[in-house]
Image: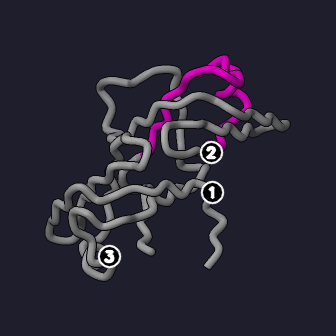
Amino acid sequence: MSLSIRNQLPGTVTAVHPGEVMATVKIRLDGGQDLTAAITLEAVNQLALAAGTAVRALVKSTEVSLATGRVDGLSIRNQLTGTITGLVTGGVMASVKVSMDGGELTAVITKEAATDLGLFVGSDVVALIKATEVSLATA
């Protein structure tokens, strides 16, 4: 199966915390950074997720926000550090490629945001991703 989701980050489940309907799944990405996914308990069971399960974390590029440094006092759990390796700016939007240990992310943000943040190839950024925007796939 091919997907249009560009961000497919390999990792391993480190913990599953089930609730009544949803569960949080903690993942150690291959590059060593941690990621949290909030998915349905039904999906956890269907995928047979447990500590040690190899997964791919899937995130649409439009669901990745960028900051120029770590952000405190924020409900977004996932803050992945990296360096910009590609920046394409259009009339309204910008596509930003971020290299991080173990992979690469693409964020699509407004051109205005890219300009306001002073983004350039080589600058360090933090990718912000809500746990509810992370989907999981198994091999």
Q: CA distance from mark 3 to mark 1?
A: 21 Å
Q: Which mark is residue 6?
A: 1
- The residue lying toward the viewer, choosing from 55 and 22, is 55
User: What residue sits right under mark 2 in the picture?
Assistant: 106
Looking at the image, which residue is at 69% across and 36% down? 110
User: Considering the image in quadrants, where does the N terminus appear?
Assistant: bottom right
Q: Earlier in the sequence, mark 3 or mark 1?
A: 1
Does residue 123 belong to the magenta stretch? yes
Going by the numbered disc 3, the residue's amino acid type is Ala
User: What residue sits right under mark 3 in the picture?
Assistant: 43
Q: Are marks 1 and 2 in contact (CB under 8 Å)?
A: yes
Q: Secondary structure at mark 3?
A: helix
Q: Is residue 57 left or right of residue 60?
A: left
Vertical side of 14 occupied by 23: above or below = below
Q: Are marks 3 and 2 in contact (CB under 8 Å)?
A: no
- The residue lying toward the viewer, choosing from 73 and 58, is 58
Q: CA distance from mark 1 to mark 2?
A: 7 Å
View extreme (bottom): residue:
46
